[in-house]
Amino acid sequence: MNDIAVDLNQVCKYYPNVNALHPLTMSVKSGEVLGLFGHNGAGKSTLMKLILGILKPSTGSVSALGHCPSSNQAHNYRTQFGYLPENVSFYEHLCGREVLHYLAKLKGHNKTQADRLLEEVNLAPAADRAVKTYSKGMRQRLGLAQAFLGSPKLLILDEPTVGLDPVATQDFYLTVDRLKSGGCAVILCSHVLPGVEHHIDRAMILSKGRKLALGPLAELREAANLPIEVSVSGLTRSVIETKMKGIITESDWLQSSSQGALHNRFNSAAENKLNILRNLSSEENLQDLHIKLPSLEDLYRYYLPDFNNAAI
Amino acid sequence: MNKILIVAQKELRDGLRNRWTSAITVIFILISLGLAYFGSATAGVLGFSSLESTLVSLASLCVMLIPLIALMLAYNCFVGELEQGTLLLLMTYPLSNAQLLLGKFTGQAAIITLASVLGFGLPAIIICLVSDVDVASVLTAFSQFIVLASLLGWVFIALAYIISLSVTEKSKAAGLALIVWFLFVLVFDLVLMAILVASEGNISETIVPFLLWVNPTDVFRILVYTIIGAESYSGVLQIAEHGADGTVYLFLVMMLWVVLPLLCSWWIFNKKELSE
């Protein structure tokens, strides 16, 4: 069993007038979940299609589950792929069950498994209605069901949680976690950042076809050295300032803090976390103390300075 | 092989469900019964009179109709799935381009074949029942006609796939399909006639008949005329009398007209990159 599920070596993709992907080297191990982030047009879909073998790289080499995905024989290995395209769509005139039966047969699985997956994504009550009557969320769940067909060893999901309600999102992450522990490599591309953090091992941030960052979230946090945000209740600003001499400066205070208020927020470097806890928790008047670590969204903004300007 | 059948089964089921198959069958039944019954009306007789004249009229009508039906059935086969987004999904499945192409072809060819068998077979049986004819010769002629009609349908399904795989919009595919139909069914014969007349017989007589092989609809007509032993060819087909009308060769030409477009579409399909 090869430990590396996906391996890209100096992969480029050019189109006649666009450079979709600059030389990119990366790999994903079995049992690892990689989060892929970037604006629209950053090259996420191109990257996924290269791994799936739908596109051929202009230069460099791609290997998925140990084989070149764009070779003539590649279709034989695709039984172990699961893919959810962005804005997934199906045969509108067929009912959900027929669609999944057809796709299951093509992947070499039986109808029982397809029916079980329909139950799993809570689509069983609507399974016998035509897909054209489905809502966005139902289509998305059908899309997930087809991606989970078989026990994929490589799962590539483009915006998997779009249109899903919170319960379905939760179920989705549970399934991803289960497949992951079974040794499946997962590439997850998402714009919806909250929620995805706890389920990814590493994150990659792409912009205009270039890799801006790749690594475990903790490492990216460290490298970015983003401040933590401390919210304190029950203490005035002056009390905090005396307690924390040398740690906070004037510019650390966040806008909402005024002199006499009992709710204050300030920024601080991550390494001061324990110091702050130690100093403030000894105060009798302290009612509440909350420390917010930089979120994935903050990291995203840090690595993509033009995030706010970009058309999303 | 198994994958081809899975795709074919889906195409066939789609064809049955969206009434394509029944619509084509009904059209075939109506025209064959109509031609059989009213075919000799100009001679002042109603009712089935001559097998030969019925099949000749049927052939001239089918030569227009079958290509149109086949092109309409198949033109959006790939471009439709491309627009829908399902082609992208299928390409990530354990399914080769050739398997998808052959699967779709098998399914749609089955639709045309089924419609021909029912649409020309039932009228043949009715003719045998209601009129005093030589049952054996009617059934033989009609079953040969069914084979040829299906084959003509297959040719245009394969041609439609070339269109369907070359464009990225359904409407463009529809337009191209119409042009292909117009060229093969109407323009080709006129142009060929014009060339023959203009050249005043300077073109070598041995080559001329082979020019008809360039058009599958003409090959179909010559084949129909050959099987029923029609004495006089009409129109541009007269040049076929000079040779090149061996049934086996013509049959092979017809098969080639199925295989070559399929190979061509396979080649286009392999070159195609789905980048959206």
Image (tube, rainbow, N blue to C red):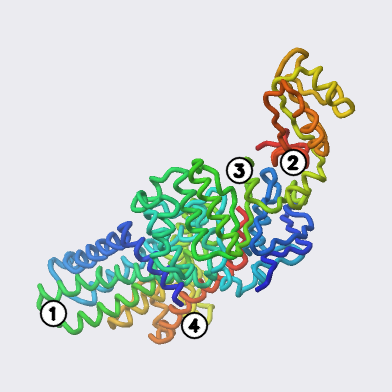
Q: Which residue is mark 2?
A: A299
Residue A247 position by quadrant: top right
Q: Which residue is mark 4?
A: B205
Estimate the spatial distance between the alpha carbons at disc 3 and disc 4, rounded to whole Å: 79 Å
Q: Residues within 10 Å of mark 2 (few under 14, many from 20)?
A: some
Q: On screen, B140 above or below B270?
A: below
Q: On screen, A191 above or below A202?
A: above
Q: Are marks 2 and 1 in contact (CB under 8 Å)?
A: no
Q: Nearer the viewer, mark 4 or mark 2?
A: 2
Please report, as a chain letter, where disc 4 is located.
B
Estimate the spatial distance between the alpha carbons at disc 1 and disc 4, rounded to whole Å: 40 Å
Q: Mark 1 or mark 4, which has the lower sequence index?
A: 1
Amino acid type of the residue tagged 3 in the rendering: Gly
Q: Nearer the viewer, residue B22 or A85?
A: A85
Q: Secondary structure at mark 4?
A: loop
Residue A259 position by quadrant: top right
Task: State the quadrant of the C terminus of chain A.
Answer: top right
Q: Mark 2 or mark 3, which has the lower sequence index?
A: 3
Amino acid type of the residue tagged 4 in the rendering: Glu
Q: Nearer the viewer, mark 3 or mark 1?
A: 3
Residue shown at the point (62%, 46%) measured from the top left: A196
Amino acid type of the residue tagged 2 in the rendering: Leu
Residue shown at the point (79%, 33%) measured from the top left: A278
Number of labels in the image equals 4
